[in-house]
Image (tube, helix red, strand yellow):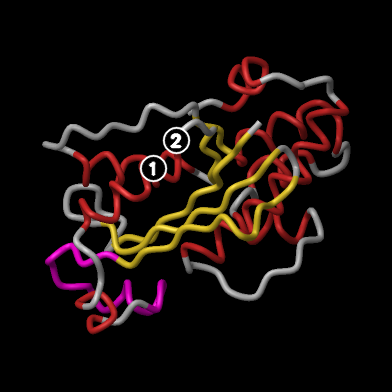
Amino acid sequence: MRYVVLDTEFTSLDKRSNRLLSVGAIAMEGTKIRMGEQFYRVLNPGVAVPAPGVVVHQLRPHDVEKGEPPLEALEALHHFLAGSVLVGHFVHMDLAVLRKELQGTEQTLVNPVVDTARVHRWIVRRGRHTEDLFHHLENVDLVSLAKAYRIEFHQAHHALQDAFLTARLWQKLLCELEAHDIRTVDQLLKIASV
C-alpha cells in the first residue's frame, strides 16, 4: 500500500481568510518511509503573511514572495498523491485549506484519507492505555503523540518536517493496527477516515 503523509502550513487559523503557504509530503510503502520520495513547496498566495503566523511557521514575507503560484504547486502535488492513501495528523485542516485553494479549478482531492489522531484514539479505546485514559484520548496533538510513542523530533510547524514526524508516527500506528487485525484499506477507512 502506498501512503502519502501530508502536512501544510497556512496564513492563519481563520477559515474565511487563511491561505496555503507551504505543503510537505513524504511517501511510504507499507511501513517503509521512502526518503527519496518527498514533496515540499512554499507557495505565494498573493496576500500578506500575518506576523503571528511567521512566529509559528517561520516563513517570512520574503520567503513567501519567492514561492510558487498556488495552482502550479498544487498540480505537482496532485501528481505526487496519485494512487495513494493520504495520511495526516488532524488532516481535516489540511484538506480544508487545500480544497479552498482548488476552488474554481478542475482539480479535486479524491484520495482515501486517514487521520492519525483518529487512529490513535481508536487504539487507545481498545486497551493500550488503562491508566489515565482521558489524558491519552485528549492530548493528541502531534508533539504529545511523538512523546507518547517515543519519537524524536526537533521542530514543529514546518510542513515537510511535520510530515516526516507524522510518517514515523504512522509507522508505529500501523504496527498497532496490525496487532488489532486491521490489515486492509477498507478496515482502516472504517475507523480513521475523514
Query: Which range is magenta?
Result: 43-58
Give the side of residue 47 with respect to residue 145, left or right.
left
On the image, the x and y values in percent for residue 43 come to 27, 64
Q: Is residue 79 above or below residue 64?
A: above
Q: Is residue 155 above or below residue 85?
A: below
Give the side of residue 124 with respect to residue 57, left or right.
right
**Residue at label 1?**
79
Q: Are marks 2 and 1 in contact (CB under 8 Å)?
A: yes
Give the side of residue 20 with respect to residue 134, left or right.
left
Depth order, front residue of 6/157: 6
At 76% from the left and 32% from the top, the residue drawn is 123
Give the side of residue 143 with respect to residue 76, left or right.
right
Q: Residues within 10 Å of mark 2 (few under 14, many from 20)?
A: some
Residue 50 part of the magenta segment: yes
At 15% from the left and 72% from the top, the residue drawn is 48
**Residue at label 2?**
82
